[in-house]
Image: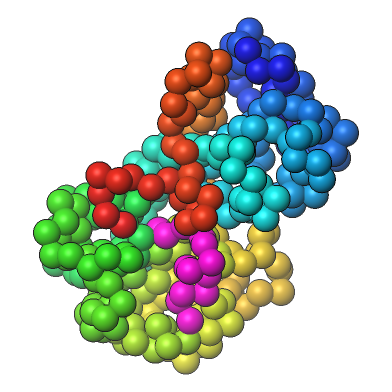
């Protein structure tokens, strides 16, 4: 049994706390309490991950730092601060697998909403206006999924099943991928961007991917294409995106993540035509919390029994590396 498990929470504690408490000496900490409770802990369950609190509370003495940190999220970019990354004795795991299918479903919903202009239909309904008009189809349209991890793969499979032509973008180019068919690398990506009707961002935020969708990438996209971001806000140069949307080069965008969250009320994105905004909820479902606890409990049991943990993050790369599949 871990000497002490600290659970960082905000608002409501995780479900299943009784099960957790039977397996570990558990204490609960808000972000304000964490600096006092984290030193000396054996493990940390980060029920909240998008916060500077963990970095700020991390003990200066490595001997007082937890040996295992579990993130209740797929993205771990906010946890990749030097003291954690550089300590080889600290294992970082995440909730890989929980968000794959829900996010894929969300992306399909966004593509349909953009193609069929559901926001316009709902606005006409609100105004009690009868406005028949044609809409776009998605069958045969080309979608480039940028990010070939589990979420990107689930998205590719679902979009292909809906009749879309799917390709991927990743670090390693290949032509025989089971989910994407063709995966474009740096040399072929510009040409792929000119052909894609939709570009879906599902990559993790790392030092290599931060700002990857900049003005040059947006300029290379097919005129009238649409951008969907369910990865991290830091993947996109938001000012450049605003400029391209305002100029009419892109038909629209569906954005679930942003460089600053919540998205400031002053952001022009709120009012731009063809732009859909959601509050970082692409992977959330009514059963999400239970699924997150299930993954953690499995790892907690493994930790106690001395067995290998699931979903171990490569702290240098910033994501879980699946050696059986190229990325």
Colour setup of the view: rainbow
Q: Residue at x 27, y 65 (%)?
A: 172
Give percent across and percent down for residue 97. 39, 37
Give percent across and percent down for residue 15. 60, 21
Quadrant of the image for the N terminus? top right
The front one of 208 and 248 is 208
In this rendering, the count of numbered labels is 0
The front one of 78 and 160 is 78
Give percent across and percent down for residue 188. 23, 79
Instruction: Identify the residue at the far bottom of this view.
Output: 247
Q: Is residue 61 left or right of residue 110?
A: right
- SS assignment for the magenta stretch, majority: loop
Question: Would residue 83 be seen by someone viewing this image from the given angle?
Answer: yes
Q: Residue at x 54, y 78 (%)?
A: 237
Quadrant of the image for the C terminus? bottom left
Q: Is residue 254 left or right of residue 135?
A: right
Q: Residue at x 78, y 34 (%)?
A: 64
Q: Quarter of the image holding residue 307?
A: top left
Magenta-colored span: 202-214
Give percent across and percent down for residue 160. 18, 55
Task: Establish if 239 lies above or below 117.
Answer: below
Q: Residue at x 52, y 62 (%)?
A: 206
Question: Would residue 125 be seen by someone viewing this image from the given angle?
Answer: no
The front one of 233 and 224 is 233
Q: Is residue 196 left or right of residue 258?
A: left
């Amino acid at each position: 049994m871990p000497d002490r498990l600290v659970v960082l929470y905000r608002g409501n504690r995780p479900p299943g706390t009784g099960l957790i408490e039977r397996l570990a000496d558990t204490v609960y900490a808000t972000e304000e309490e964490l600096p006092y409770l984290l030193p000396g802990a054996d493990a940390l369950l980060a029920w909240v991950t998008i916060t500077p609190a963990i970095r700020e509370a991390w003990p200066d003495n490595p001997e007082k730092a937890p040996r295992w940190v579990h993130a209740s999220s797929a993205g771990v970019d906010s946890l990749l601060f030097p003291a954690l990354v550089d300590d080889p004795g600290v294992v970082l795991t995440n909730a890989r697998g929980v968000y794959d299918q829900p996010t894929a479903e969300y992306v399909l919903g966004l593509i349909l909403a953009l193609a069929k202009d559901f926001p316009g239909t709902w606005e006409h309904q609100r105004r009690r206006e009868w406005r028949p008009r044609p809409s776009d189809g998605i069958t045969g349209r080309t979608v480039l999924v940028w990010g070939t991890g589990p979420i990107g793969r689930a998205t590719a499979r679902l979009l292909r099943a809906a009749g879309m032509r799917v390709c991927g973008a990743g670090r390693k180019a290949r032509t025989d991928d089971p989910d994407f068919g063709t995966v474009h690398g740096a040399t072929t990506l510009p040409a792929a961007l000119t052909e894609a009707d939709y570009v879906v961002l599902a990559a993790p935020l790392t030092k290599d991917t931060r700002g990857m969708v900049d003005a040059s990438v947006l300029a290379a996209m097919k005129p009238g294409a649409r951008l969907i971001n369910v990865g991290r806000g830091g993947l996109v140069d938001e000012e450049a995106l605003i400029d391209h949307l305002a100029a009419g080069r892109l038909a629209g965008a569906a954005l679930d993540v942003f460089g600053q969250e919540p998205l400031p009320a002053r952001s022009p994105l709120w009012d731009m035509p063809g732009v859909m905004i959601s509050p970082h909820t692409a992977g959330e479902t009514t059963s999400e919390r239970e699924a997150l606890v299930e993954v953690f409990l499995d790892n907690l049991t493994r930790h106690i029994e001395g067995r290998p943990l699931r979903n171990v993050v490569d702290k240098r790369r910033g994501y879980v590396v699946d050696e059986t599949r190229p990325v």
